[in-house]
Amino acid sequence: MANFVDKLAWLLVVDGRLLSTRSKGKDTFYIPGGKRESGESDEQALRREIREELTVELVPESIVHAGTFEAQAHGKAEGVVVRMTCYWADYVGELAPGAEIEEIVWLDYGGREDSSPVDKLIFDLLRQRGDL
């Protein structure tokens, strides 16, 4: 059985572009989010990660499951799979890089190539839906 990396991610699309981030020292873009800490629910982990990475608060009652995606984990040994559970949500505050984030970007479908394998699946779905 494969090893899984359990991650949560926030999908925000504005004007046909997806919010993405680049961590310090990295050359790949990632949809914002991260790993849960022990005992956290999806909502708790997602809200904490977004607060740490982007300095905004997700509106709890607006959080809606968008899908769960699996792919080879970027930068990990072959066979390590990331399982990314994605949510739509509204937010309050002003987006700004926090924690380990170097850059916040808005990517159209062309940004897919500079993103992690699991993010590419999400780009494809969003394009299919007509969001990108």
Image (spheres, grey):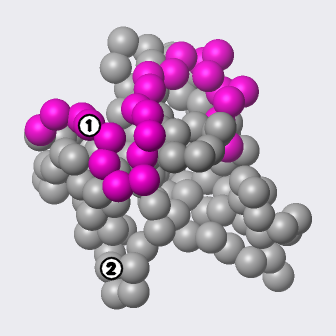
**According to the image, label 2 marks what residue?**
40
Mark 1 Cα shell of 10 Å, populated few (<14), some (14-19), many (≥20):
some
Q: Amino acid at mark 2?
A: Glu
Q: Amino acid at mark 1?
A: Ala
In the image, 76 versus 84, the foreground residue is 76
- Rendered position, 3 above or below 108: below
**According to the image, label 1 marks what residue?**
96
From this viewpoint, is residue 65 visible? no
Span colored in magenta: 93-116
From the viewer's perspective, tell me whether residue 57 is left or right of residue 109.
left
- Rendered position, 45 above or below 101: below
Distance Cα–Cα, label 1 vs label 2: 24 Å
Residue found 74% across the figure and 78% down from its top:
3
From the viewer's perspective, tell me whether residue 41 is left or right of residue 75.
left
Residue found 47% across the figure and 68% down from its top:
35
From this viewpoint, is residue 70 visible? yes
- Magenta includes 113? yes
From the viewer's perspective, tell me whether residue 17 is left or right of residue 2.
left
